Image (tube, rainbow, N blue to C red):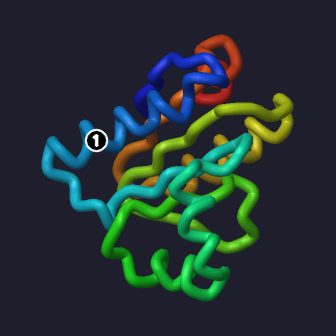
Amino acid sequence: MQLLPAAPGDAVERADEAVDALLESGRRPGDVLVLTVGEAHPWQQHELSFGEESYWAQLADGGDVFYADADASRPLSRDVVVLVVNDGTAGRVERAARKALDGAGALLVVCGERELVAPLFA
């Protein structure tokens, strides 16, 4: 697990930087899943504007980075999961952390406040 400290208001930007670094290091876009605890990532909002069916088809296709809400009812997994702790109660963050850890095949990157998330992975 890799922790990238970020305040809730900066967590999305920090996650975008992490995704860029992962792709630059050779990870395929389809290997990366970004889960948000608070407000949906702007790219998720954009993709959902084309409809739920099209949005979820992208997950199955696996050709690009996929952005989803950590509370999504569908099973979500990829080789790399980036968890964006951009809001949420401690309970919601804890559920999201478990889901992200379970869904990460090789690497979990957490972008959030160290004091909030570090104890969840100790």
Quadrant for residue 30, please give it: bottom left
Q: Relative to residue 79, is residue 107 depicted above or below?
A: above
Q: Relative to residue 44, is residue 85 depicted above or below?
A: above
Count the labels in the image. Answer: 1
**Which image quadrant: the N terminus?**
top left
* 53 or 82, nearer to the observer: 53
Question: Residue at label 1?
Answer: 20
> Left or right of 24: which side holds 82?
right
Q: Position of residue 34 (x, y in %)?
A: 50, 51
Quadrant for residue 18, please give it: top left
Q: What residue sits 55% from the left and 41% below the top?
A: 83
Q: Relative to residue 15, is residue 65 depicted above or below?
A: below
> Left or right of 85: which side holds 87?
right
Quadrant for residue 68, please give it: bottom right
**Which image quadrant: the C terminus?**
top right
> Left or right of 59: which side holds 115?
right
Look at the numbered disc 1 and give the secondary structure of its residue.
helix
Q: Position of residue 37 (x, y in %)?
A: 70, 43
* 70 or 12, nearer to the observer: 12
Q: What residue sits 62% from the left and 71% below the top?
A: 48
> Left or right of 86: which side holds 76?
left
Classify mark 1: residues with Cα within 10 Å, few (<14), some (14-19) or many (20+): few
Q: Position of residue 91 (x, y in %)?
A: 85, 36
Q: What residue sits 51% from the left and 85% below the top?
A: 57
Identify residue type, mark 1. Answer: Asp
Q: Position of residue 80 (x, y in %)?
A: 38, 52
Q: What residue sits 55% from the left and 47% below the top?
A: 101
